[in-house]
Image (cartoon, grey):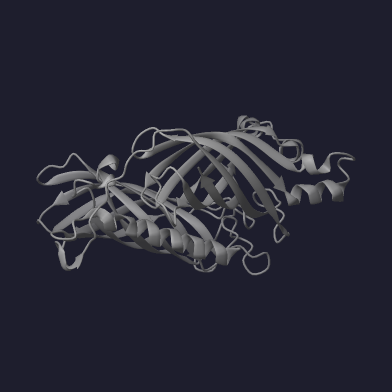
């Protein structure tokens, strides 16, 4: 499972970071990189007090490309972000408990209030990270945050940029790093690190030897389409922190949607999702919870509303759903949870992830897509889902 996560994320990053290759005219335009170097300083919180727990420190390099320079660029609809890839290396404050991390993820950067010597930017990135010291009940029981070597990482930051030279700029700001493995291994409280940042930006100019292909013009598909999909996921049947080292179980899903492009880059969808949890069925049989309808009571049925940002052969999807059927999660895992969030978890499900379109692009009426998502109950991770969808 962990290898599959790594392979899938790597494929997504390659497609995402090369998607801006249609940015430039093949006759006159070249790759125009922007290089960010940053130092990050923060502190990782852990439920268990750790001796010699110091502050976290990270080094980050981002290689971005200026988009929207050509007339047909679909990035003009996204307000011309700088798009590229980031690499992060971090020490998390205690090498014996938390170890260190290495992250890789696509990044978008927006610049605002651009004046001669001053500007402001917002940076968004999400991908995967490798941790050298995850939780282990024998050798590392004090790390209650991350239970696996591979996890998702999300990096959001904002900075003030000072221009002292046309090619060299200084930036300082704050940001949040969030890490979660999607409930594929317990514990999974998640790592949150609020950091202060100091760095520089280097603009070497156009790299003349690297021409980019000419962009294509896409027509908006304006009719309602139908989509059918299947997916598989896997998770540990457990609470957030216990029991650990338990078995993992598959989740199988089928879904049906109707969808429509409401603008050149925005698609909305409405549908229904059915999921069968193998772990729920095992729990029902083991605890003799029900005599009848065991298969149905191992299921979750939800009504979904979704949105997708369309980006050539790539899409960013967010879904929110109303759970109509979910007996085990409500009656077993939330039995004693009387908090407001516990009530919402009974009924609200979410899905956040990526789609890639290997044949036709995301703007096509008929298309096949492969996706990877984090499935949640409200905001709490449930499992990592891999899906295939056909739209016609």
Q: Is residue 276 above or below residue 267?
A: below
Task: Name the residue: 23% across, 51% down.
Answer: 67
Q: Is residue 55 visible?
A: no
Q: Is residue 127 left or right of residue 219?
A: right
* Image location of residue 103, percent across then percent down: 43, 62
Task: Name the residue: 24% across, 56% down.
Answer: 65
* Image location of residue 338, percent across then percent down: 68, 31
Name the image quarter holding residue 38.
Answer: bottom left
Name the image quarter holding residue 140.
Answer: bottom right
Q: How many marks?
A: 0
Q: Is residue 1 above or below residue 342?
A: below
Q: Is residue 314 visible?
A: yes
* Image location of residue 1, percent across then percent down: 61, 63
Task: Name the residue: 65% across, 47% down.
Answer: 253
The residue lying toward the viewer, choosing from 209 and 122, is: 209
The residue lying toward the viewer, choosing from 2 and 50, is: 2
Q: Is residue 375 left or right of residue 33?
A: right
Name the image quarter holding residue 186.
Answer: bottom right
The residue lying toward the viewer, choosing from 219 and 230, is: 219
Q: Is residue 263 left or right of residue 95?
A: left
The residue lying toward the viewer, choosing from 285 and 261, is: 261
* Image location of residue 35, percent across then percent down: 24, 61
């Amino acid at each position: 499972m962990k290898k599959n996560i790594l392979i899938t994320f790597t494929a997504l990053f390659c497609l995402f970071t090369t998607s801006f290759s249609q940015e430039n005219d093949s006759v006159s335009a070249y790759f125009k990189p922007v290089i960010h170097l940053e130092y990050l300083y923060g502190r990782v919180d852990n439920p268990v007090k750790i001796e010699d727990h110091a502050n976290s420190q990270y080094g980050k390099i981002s290689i971005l490309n200026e988009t929207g320079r050509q007339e047909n660029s679909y990035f003009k609809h996204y307000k011309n972000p700088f798009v590229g890839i980031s690499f992060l290396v971090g020490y998390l404050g205690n090498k014996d408990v938390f170890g260190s991390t290495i992250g890789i993820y696509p990044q978008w950067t927006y610049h605002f209030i651009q004046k001669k010597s001053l500007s402001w930017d917002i940076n968004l990135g999400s991908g995967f990270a490798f941790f050298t010291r995850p939780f282990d009940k024998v050798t590392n029981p004090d790390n209650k945050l991350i239970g696996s070597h591979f996890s998702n990482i999300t990096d959001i930051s904002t900075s003030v940029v000072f221009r002292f030279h046309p090619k060299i700029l200084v930036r300082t700001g704050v940001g949040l790093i969030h890490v979660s493995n999607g409930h594929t291994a317990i514990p999974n409280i998640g790592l949150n690190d609020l950091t202060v940042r100091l760095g520089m930006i280097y603009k070497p100019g156009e790299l003349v030897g690297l021409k980019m292909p000419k962009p294509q013009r896409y027509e908006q598909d304006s009719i309602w389409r139908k989509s059918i999909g299947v997916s598989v996921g896997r998770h540990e049947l457990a609470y957030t922190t216990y029991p650990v080292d338990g078995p993992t179980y598959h989740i199988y899903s089928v879904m049906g949607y109707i969808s429509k492009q409401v603008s050149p880059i925005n698609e909305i969808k409405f549908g229904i999702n059915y999921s069968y949890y193998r772990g729920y069925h095992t729990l029902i049989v083991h605890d003799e919870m029900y005599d009848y309808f065991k298969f149905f009571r191992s299921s979750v049925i939800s009504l979904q509303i979704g949105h997708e940002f369309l980006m050539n052969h790539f899409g960013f999807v967010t879904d929110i759903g109303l759970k109509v059927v979910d007996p085990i999660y409500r009656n077993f895992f939330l039995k004693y949870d009387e908090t407001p969030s516990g009530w919402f978890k009974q009924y609200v499900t979410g899905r956040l992830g990526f789609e890639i379109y290997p044949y036709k692009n995301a703007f096509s009426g008929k298309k096949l897509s492969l996706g990877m998502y984090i499935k949640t109950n409200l905001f709490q991770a449930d499992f990592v889902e891999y899906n295939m969808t056909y739209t016609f």
